[in-house]
């Protein structure tokens, strides 16, 4: 008889034995954080004693149903950015994330509220507003300068906070970001595949610092993976002021550059101000590009990052992981090459070293 009971034991059997609901048993056996640890242990023990065995095919089906079924409203998440969406360039970069973040939040039962032009100085006011609205999940996204949580007068223990964008001064918050170094390696590898042999980095000091020297680091990793490429000195500009064109022109001529890697939005205009044509005389590829735009470079997959940001902060809320993490976790998303029109194969490029 005991064997017969074990062979027919279901979750409803366990629920009836404990006097709890079938849904509670189901969640407890899936280690759902909404069920207390004590109850999960109690259910697991009873299921073992009664001989419950998980049906893998049914579990797979139910997992699919739960994943595709729209969830009831769970709350609101804050999307905090220092972008000024009245500036077209900043709005365009922000929009690559926003629509995908909103969609994924809705699928998980959350509304996404945006707080723009917000930095450390606005932190106390932001915190008061978030707490008044009952918002626990916060995504701090795409900061123009490196993020230093010490500058924020913010009681982090009340929030599940996540970072995306420029690097952190000290890794403090969990982050979901583009694999900047890996993406830079992709840029150099693609330019090399296109026949370019004299590839140089041209950017500003401030941008290299904000991105944790990803172009410089990516270049050294690329050279280790692809021996034989000359280590051409980078052109790191203090700014894009009047002297920038003269400095870049001298650098291009001295090192006979045939392709440039950059992160600077105005780099095409700057290069052409030296008398070179892009891409006829000089290929240009960017670390990050708009997949709908003309620039060649890496599409950083903002759609995937947006989804991962939402999923990570929702998981933190539902598992009650609030405050600064003891060990910050970093999730990196690889990008994809976007052909664009600013980089072409070397055999069709006429580089004039005399210019």
Image (spheres, helix red, strand yellow):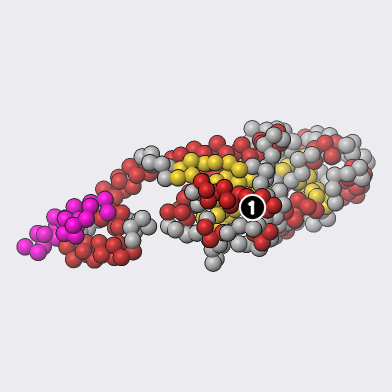
Q: Main secondary structure of the magenta part?
A: helix
Q: Check if residue 19 falls in the magenta segment.
A: yes
- When the figure is inspected, residue 160 is found, relative to residue 104, above or below; the finding is below
* Image quadrant where one finds the C terminus: top right
Residue 57 place in picture, x, y as percent: 27, 49
Which structural element holds mark 1? helix
**Corner quadrant of residue 265:** top right
Task: Name the residue rendered at 61%, 57% in the picture.
Answer: 154
Q: Which residues are magenta?
A: 1-24
Task: Name the residue rendered at 55%, 54% in the picture.
Answer: 161
Q: Check if residue 94 falls in the magenta segment.
A: no
**Corner quadrant of residue 53:** bottom left
Residue 142 place in picture, x, y as percent: 65, 47
**Corner quadrant of residue 304:** top right
In-image side of 27 versus 289 (left or right): left
- Specify the farthest residue to the left: 1
* Image quadrant where one finds the N terminus: bottom left
In-image side of 146 versus 163 (left or right): right
Q: Is residue 83 visible?
A: yes
């Amino acid at each position: 008889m005991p064997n017969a009971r074990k062979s027919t034991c279901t979750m409803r059997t366990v629920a009836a034995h404990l006097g709890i609901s079938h849904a509670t048993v189901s969640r407890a056996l899936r280690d759902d954080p909404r069920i207390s640890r004590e109850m999960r242990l109690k259910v697991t023990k009873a299921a073992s004693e009664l001989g419950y065995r998980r049906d893998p095919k049914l579990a797979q089906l139910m997992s699919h149903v739960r994943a595709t079924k729209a969830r009831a409203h769970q709350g609101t998440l804050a999307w905090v950015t220092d972008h000024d969406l009245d500036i077209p360039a900043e709005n365009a970069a922000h929009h690559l994330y926003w629509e995908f973040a909103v969609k994924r939040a809705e699928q998980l039962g959350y509304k996404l509220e945006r707080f723009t032009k917000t930095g450390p100085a606005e932190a106390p006011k932001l915190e008061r507003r978030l707490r008044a609205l009952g918002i626990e999940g916060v995504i701090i996204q795409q900061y123009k300068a490196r993020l230093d949580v010490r500058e924020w007068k913010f009681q982090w223990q009340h929030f599940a906070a996540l970072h995306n964008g420029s690097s952190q001064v000290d890794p403090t918050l969990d982050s979901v970001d583009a694999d900047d170094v890996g993406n830079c390696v992709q840029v150099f590898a693609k330019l090399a595949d296109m026949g370019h042999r004299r590839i140089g980095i041209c950017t500003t000091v401030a941008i290299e610092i904000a991105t944790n020297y990803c172009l410089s680091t990516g270049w050294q990793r690329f050279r280790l993976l692809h021996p034989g490429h000359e280590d051409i000195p980078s052109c790191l500009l203090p700014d894009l002021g009047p002297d920038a064109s003269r400095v870049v022109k001298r650098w291009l001529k001295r090192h006979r550059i045939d392709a440039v890697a950059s992160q600077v939005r105005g780099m095409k205009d700057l290069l052409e101000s030296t008398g070179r044509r892009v891409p006829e005389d000089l290929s240009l590829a960017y670390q990050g590009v708009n997949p709908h735009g003309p620039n060649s470079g890496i599409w950083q997959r903002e759609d995937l990052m947006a989804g991962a940001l939402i999923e990570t902060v929702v998981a933190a809320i539902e598992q009650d992981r609030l405050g600064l993490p003891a060990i910050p976790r970093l999730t990196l998303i690889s990008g994809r090459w976007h052909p664009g029109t600013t980089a072409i194969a070397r055999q069709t490029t006429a580089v004039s070293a005399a210019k």
